Image (cartoon, grey):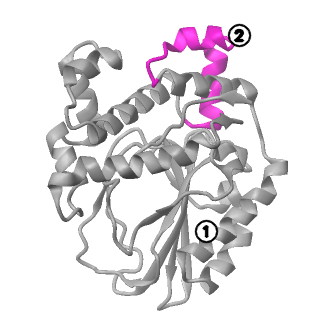
Amino acid sequence: MIRCMPYIPLTATPLRKKNEYREMLPEDLALHPYIRCFWGSEKPYWKNENAVSDLVIPDTCVDIIYYIDHTDHTLTSVFCGINDRGFRDGSTVGNGHLMSVFAIRFYAWGAYAFSEDSLEGTCNGFYEVPSRFRWLDERLRRPLLEHRLLTERTQLAERLLIRKMSDIRQNTVLNSAVQQILYQKGTTNAAQLAKDCFISSRQLERLFSRYIGITPKKLGNLVRYQFLWNEIMRNKEFSTLDAVVKYGFTDQSHLLREFKRYHTMDLSSAKRYAAKDVENIQYVSEIFCVKFMVNLDYLFRSSYMSV
C-alpha cells in the first residue's frame, strides 16, 4: 500500500449539470484507486440532431461508454483510450431517438487491472469494449437495456467490478512510478523516475506503453496539465507566473502554449467555456471549490491507495 495524495482530473466543463451528463463517485472505497467516476444520463432523453458537440480534453482517464437506444432497443459500446489532445465529440449515435448513456471512467493507470488485453496503441483510439473487457461487457450489456436510471446502472457495474477485485492484474513497478508522478504533480524527470523504480528507462517505457498506452514523460505532462487546470478553476487569484515556478515550466510562454495545446483554447476562453452551463458565472470559482472539496474529502478516506 502506497500513500498518495488524492487526484481529481477534470473535464472541460466540470460544473456542468444536465440530465444528459451526471457523475457518480464509486461508493466502495476499494474502487477509488482505479475509477474516477461513473457517468451518464440520469434517465432517457431525446437525442437532438442539432446538438452542439462537447469539448473533450485530456483527463488522464479512459472510458467504457454504452449508448442505449430505447427507440430501437439496441446498444452500442466503445472503449476510449487515453487522450493526449483535445477534440470535439461529434457522436451522432441515436440522433432523433430516445437515448440514454452509461459509462465507467477509469484512471488510465487503473483500467489495465480489469482488462483482458494490453492497452498498447490505444492512445487517442476508439475500440469495441469486448476487445479488452469482454468479461464486463457480457455481464453489463443486457441489464443496461433493462435498467434506465443512472443509479441502478452504477450499482450494477460497481458490484461487478468489486467481485472482480480478487482477480485483477497488478504491476508493482508501474504502480510505484505512477504514484511518483502524481505525488510530484507531473514534474517528475523520466530518467530519474526509472532510477527511483530500479529499472531502465527503456523497460519503464515498455511497461507504460503496455499497461497505459503512453510513455512516462507524456503521462507526466498530462498530469501536470490537469493539476494546472484544477488550480485555474479553484483559484480566483490564479497567477501564471507563480504556476510557472510551481509546475516547472520554462517560462510563461511555455505554460500558455502547453495549456492551449491540450485544451485547444487559452486560459480565459477555457474558464468561460467551463462556465457555459452555469447560471451565474460570477460564482464559478466558489461553486467549483465546494464541489472539489466534497470530492477531496471523499477521496481522502481512501488515501492509502493500492495502485
Q: Which residues are magenta?
A: 185-213
- Residue 14 in percent (x, y) is at 35, 53
Q: Which residue is drawn at the image coordinates 15% and 41% (left, top)?
A: 268
Q: Quadrant of residue 236?
A: top left
Q: CA distance from mark 1 to mark 2?
A: 39 Å
Eye-nearest disc, 1 or 2:
1
Mark carried by residue 154: 1
Q: Is residue 255 visible?
A: yes
In terms of sequence position, does the residue under pointer 1 or pointer 2 come before the other? 1
Q: Is residue 77 left or right of residue 21?
A: right
The residue most toward the bottom is 71
Q: Does the CB distance between marks 1 and 2 fall below 8 Å?
A: no
For residue 288, above or below residue 152: above
Does the magenta-highlighted stretch encompass residue 208?
A: yes
Identify residue type, mark 1. Thr
Q: Is residue 64 magenta?
A: no
Secondary structure found at label 1: helix
* Left or right of 188 in this view: 268: left
**Quick one: which residue is furthest to the right in this view?**
166
